[in-house]
């Protein structure tokens, strides 16, 4: 709680860890040494302070640091879930609001969760966030019983959907995770009213929670659980994410039909249908049953899946069944049509000249009809479904072509007298061969399509099915879905880590290559983080589970890759618009072709009419159009994930291929992000003594430059003298009393403010600046005693990475908050000519916007946390790091490891993917643009020949195979190994 009176601000900070008056005295003494802070009241539970001056944030921060340096805790730790944050801008908006609160000491915010260290009550924090239009809720984990089937699950989901206080949920037959403002008791009663039982799995994990920092979660929440439910907002992202496996889709026009059907369901916010995978991702609060029913009413099938493993299992089952049917159709079609075609080729009669011919070809007609009713059944069934829903698909074209050839031939067999003698030709081989060739094409295509998603399958295979849980000193193997947050687990040598966690005992090396692309195992010991899917090398590790189920980094990566593979770039949307009208146009062309040949064609005009119309119907291939872009996206995103590059969606893939400018944040991106002392010049006195004094002055500061000096002293094992009468000024420096002498440490402005002469040291300062070092003065009341150069070392691979990017024709710009001289010096070392210096964090997005106004397509490369607004403003945001929550949430592309060379690979892969998409689309368009006129007989006046429907069927199958094969080349895109 804070109150303000003129330039005095009063704070009450909750305390924990103080057990006696001796503790109170220690805190009192520490606070008395801070200039600008005065104690009003203090006991073991709290301290009331008044901070003086126009800016009270700095002395307050010093007070918190001083108390925590004694081993005590200040304030509360609030944990809760968030709803309504759609993007990095939303996260940045919440962070900015928290930054404005001086008593918010630290925070970590993502689109779904917040972890805040503050002295404010939880109710105050929630009010701050809800004033921005977002929602805060509990996350309840419930064990369910009595649910025996998918219908029971759907019943619970419908009840949750109908309750406006429920933001998001995941329900299975055994468990549910629900984000809501309802209390656990109310939620359990709601489920009980449906005839099922629910129990809270782990009440201590219920959120929002308010705890003392670094302590077990025992403190009770300050939110009144019966408070009025916050209203939903239209911008809320409190939508559940559902996956469906689809059936009955054959071409791009089907995609549009399914998307339209699902979008018409109330509560659907977004839908993405993937033809290549025969799947859909739906976001919203719609009923899954309603979505399934809508898809069914549109003439297709849909089945909801619980997770990616379930989806993969059902897709594999579906693909196996399809492949089996296609193989049967291929064998039957080619087995019947091949001999008939061979008979015609060797000179056998294909016309009806006698009653014996009628009997013989009548038997062939029956066999062909049996083929169409079995091997070709799915073509006709799908075409009929499309007709019933007033649509036309690829199956419509095949059914019309093969059906027309069979009907015409059968009519000639039954009543040859009705046809001129020259028109008594039969085309049963065309019907049979078309079914066989197209089925063969579908079989090859289905096998190749399955290969494009192998990268995602490999990620899914990383997670082991079981885990070793330690309870009461005993190890028990449990299914992974029974492992809960907070449990203690063991991972043996050679085993995969089952969930995210923190090491509590043991040491080992972990192979993280499948997640980060880094081939070198990483050392892990007590306190280090483990990630699900990584492989333990030699030692045995005991760890506590911190993230399970969908909360692991592996699960988030899988979700990200899955959504990216299902997303559509602008190129695909163009193809979809064309495909939506493609089949009706082809049918119209076939009818026009038939009419022209009937009117002006040579005799027998009926035969010419049939051949040309059938060939036009068969050669047209909307399937190739529909597969042209989704397969390229799936293969490219999967390949990127294999080497530790996460691409959020297809638009990011397409935009990254057309970048003009790359803007790098300096700290933590081009540099290591860990400043260190690189030069010390002792002017008056012993260097070790002077550095000990400098560290003593800086030890209570959290500034990175101050920490560099303190770390230097620790590394040199220097004994720090006691300092008192401490005073500081933000952005300038610090002063304190040490051994009855006044010392000052800081920048040029701080020295000028103290009246200390520095001109005689300008040559040394200039030399430091030229080396890219930040110069820090240490002085006493009389003169400068030492000059300390601190720099943030350049990454080992930064110079080469910048050169490679520039060699690709990209403009590279460095953003820095440093002094222009220092920033330009670092820029020269990196080979970067365009340096923008003196930029504050909130000004980075303005710099990006300024570049965009010049017509440049800009990518911003940062750490994904401090640079969130700039990442959101850029055409493509690229986050460096090890896949932190904020990095993954705020960027369109995330590099899961720390090598900048991966960025050049990501851009090159994006360019290759866009080229691949364009090749596929160009091939599909050219094939149809040239193939349909040839099929219609445009070359007949010059050659005297028509294209056979059988050849058209083979060409149609080949066009799809070509697209699939070309897309699969991206799976083998060459990545520079030295960049990995």
Image: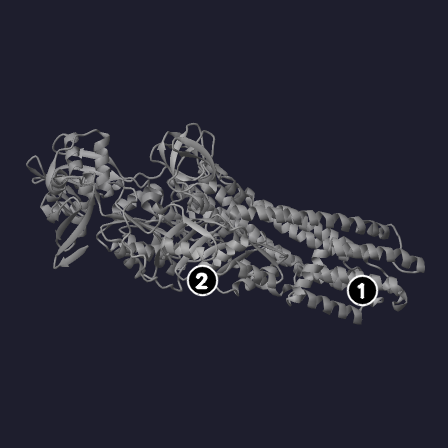
Residue 618: horizontal and vertical position, in percent?
72, 59
Residue 378: horizontal and vertical position, in percent?
70, 56
Read off the residue under disc 1. 608
Q: Nearer the viewer, residue 945 or 59?
A: 59
Q: Which mark is residue 487?
A: none
Of callouts 1 and 2, the N-terminal one:
2
Vertical placement of residue 237 versus 47, above or below: below
Direction from residue 87 to residue 610 in the image, left or right: right
Residue drawn where x is 16% and y is 40% of the image: 777
Vertical placement of residue 222 versus 748, above or below: below
Residue reaching furthest top?
538
User: Depth-wise, is mark 1 or mark 2 nearer the camera?
Assistant: 2
Which color mode does the image show?
Answer: one colour
User: Element under label 1?
Assistant: helix
- Mark 1 is surrounded, within 10 Å at the Cα level, by few (under 14), some (14 to 19) or many (20 or more) other residues, namely many
- Quadrant hosting residue 596: bottom right
User: Element under label 2?
Assistant: loop
Residue drawn where x is 12% and y is 31% of the image: 685
Q: Which mark is residue 162?
A: 2
């Amino acid at each position: 709680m804070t109150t303000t009176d003129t330039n005095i601000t009063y704070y009450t900070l909750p305390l924990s860890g103080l057990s006696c008056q001796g503790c109170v005295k220690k805190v009192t003494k520490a606070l008395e040494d801070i200039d600008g802070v005065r104690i009003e009241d203090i006991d073991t539970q709290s301290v009331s302070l008044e901070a003086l001056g126009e800016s009270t944030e700095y002395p307050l921060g010093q007070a918190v640091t001083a108390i925590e340096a004694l081993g005590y805790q200040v304030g509360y730790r609030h944990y809760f879930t968030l709803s309504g944050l759609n993007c990095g801008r939303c996260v940045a908006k919440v962070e900015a609001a928290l930054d404005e609160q001086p008593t918010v000491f630290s925070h970590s915010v993502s689109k779904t969760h917040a972890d805040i260290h503050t002295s404010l009550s939880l109710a105050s924090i929630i009010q701050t966030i809800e004033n921005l239009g977002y929602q805060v809720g509990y996350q309840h984990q419930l064990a369910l019983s009595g649910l025996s089937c998918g219908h029971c699950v759907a019943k619970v989901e419908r009840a949750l959907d109908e309750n406006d206080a429920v933001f998001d949920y995941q329900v299975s037959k055994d468990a549910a995770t629900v984000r809501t403002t309802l209390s656990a008791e109310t939620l359990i009663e709601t489920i009980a009213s449906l005839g099922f039982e629910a129990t809270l799995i782990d009440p201590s994990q219920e959120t929002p929670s308010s705890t003392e920092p670094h302590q077990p979660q025992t403190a009770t929440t300050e939110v009144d659980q019966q408070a009025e439910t916050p209203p939903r907002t239209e911008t809320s992202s409190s939508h559940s994410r559902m996956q469906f496996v689809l059936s009955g889709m054959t071409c791009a026009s089907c995609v549009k039909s399914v998307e339209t059907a699902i979008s018409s369901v109330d509560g659907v916010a977004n839908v993405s249908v993937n033809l290549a995978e025969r799947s859909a991702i739906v976001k919203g609060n719609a009923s899954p049953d309603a979505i399934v029913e809508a898809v069914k009413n549109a003439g297709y099938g849909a089945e909801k899946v619980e997770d990616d493993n379930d989806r993969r299992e059902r897709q594999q089952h579906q693909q196996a069944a399809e492949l089996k049917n296609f193989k049967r159709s291929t064998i039957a079609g080619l087995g019947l049509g091949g001999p008939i075609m061979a008979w015609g080729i060797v000179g056998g009669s294909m016309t009806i000249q006698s009653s014996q011919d009628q009997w013989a070809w009548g038997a062939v007609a029956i066999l062909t009809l049996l083929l169409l009713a079995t091997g070709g059944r799915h073509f006709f069934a799908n075409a009929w479904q499309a007709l019933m829903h007033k649509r036309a698909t690829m199956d419509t074209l095949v059914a019309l072509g093969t059906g027309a050839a069979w009907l015409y031939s059968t009519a000639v067999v039954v009543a040859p007298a009705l046809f001129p003698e020259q028109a008594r030709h039969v085309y049963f081989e065309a019907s049979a061969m078309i079914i066989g060739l197209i089925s063969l094409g579908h079989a090859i295509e289905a096998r190749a399509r399955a290969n494009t998603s192998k990268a995602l399958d490999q990620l899914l295979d990383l997670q082991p099915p079981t885990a070793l849980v330690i309870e009461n000193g005993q190890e028990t193997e449990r299914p992974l879905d029974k492992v809960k947050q907070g449990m203690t687990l063991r991972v043996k040598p050679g085993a995969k880590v089952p969930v995210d966690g923190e090491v509590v005992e043991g040491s080992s090396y972990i192979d993280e290559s499948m997640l980060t692309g880094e081939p070198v195992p990483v050392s892990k010991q007590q306190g280090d983080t483990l990630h699900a899917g990584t492989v333990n090398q030699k030692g045995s590790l005991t760890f506590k589970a911190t993230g399970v189920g969908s909360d692991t980094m592996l699960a988030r990566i899988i979700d990200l890759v899955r959504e990216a593979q299902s997303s559509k770039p602008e190129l695909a949307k163009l193809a979809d618009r064309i495909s939506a009208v493609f089949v009706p146009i082809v049918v119209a062309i076939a009818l026009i072709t038939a009419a022209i040949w009937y009117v002006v064609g040579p005799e027998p005009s009926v035969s010419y009419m049939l051949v040309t119309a059938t060939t036009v119907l068969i050669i047209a291939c909307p399937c190739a159009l529909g597969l042209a872009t989704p397969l390229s996206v799936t293969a490219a995103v999967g390949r990127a994930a294999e080497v530790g590059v996460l691409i959020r969606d297809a638009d990011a893939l397409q935009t990254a291929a057309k970048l003009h400018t790359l803007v790098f944040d300096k700290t933590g991106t081009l540099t290591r992000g860990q400043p260190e002392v690189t030069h010390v010049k002792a002017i008056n006195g012993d260097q070790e003594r002077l550095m000990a004094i400098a560290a003593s002055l800086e030890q209570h500061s959290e500034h990175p430059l101050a920490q560099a000096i303190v770390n230097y002293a620790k590394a040199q094992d220097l004994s720090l003298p006691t300092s008192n009468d401490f005073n500081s000024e933000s952005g300038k420096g610090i002063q304190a009393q040490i051994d009855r002498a006044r010392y000052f440490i800081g920048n040029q402005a701080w020295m000028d403010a103290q009246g200390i002469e520095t001109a005689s040291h300008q040559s040394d300062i200039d030399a430091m600046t030229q080396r890219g070092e930040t110069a820090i003065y240490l002085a006493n009341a009389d003169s400068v005693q030492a000059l300390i150069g601190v720099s943030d070392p350049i990454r080992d691979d930064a110079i080469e990475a910048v050169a490679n990017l520039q060699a690709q024709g990209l403009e590279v710009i460095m953003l820095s908050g440093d002094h222009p001289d220092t920033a330009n010096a670092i820029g020269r070392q990196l080979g970067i000519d365009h340096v923008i210096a003196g930029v504050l964090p909130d000004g980075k997005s303005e710099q990006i916007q300024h570049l965009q106004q010049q017509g440049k397509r800009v990518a911003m490369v940062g750490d994904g946390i401090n640079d969130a607004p700039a990442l959101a403003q850029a055409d493509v945001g690229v986050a460096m790091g090890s896949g932190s929550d904020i990095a993954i949430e705020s960027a369109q592309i995330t590099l899961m490891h720390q090598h900048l060379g991966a960025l050049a690979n990501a851009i090159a892969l994006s360019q290759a993917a866009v080229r691949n998409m364009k090749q596929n689309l160009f091939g599909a368009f050219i094939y149809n643009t040239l193939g349909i006129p040839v099929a219609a007989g445009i070359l007949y006046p010059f050659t005297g020949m028509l294209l056979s429907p059988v050849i058209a069927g083979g060409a149609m199958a080949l066009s799809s195979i070509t697209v699939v094969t070309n897309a699969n080349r991206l799976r083998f895109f060459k990545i520079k190994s030295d960049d990995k």
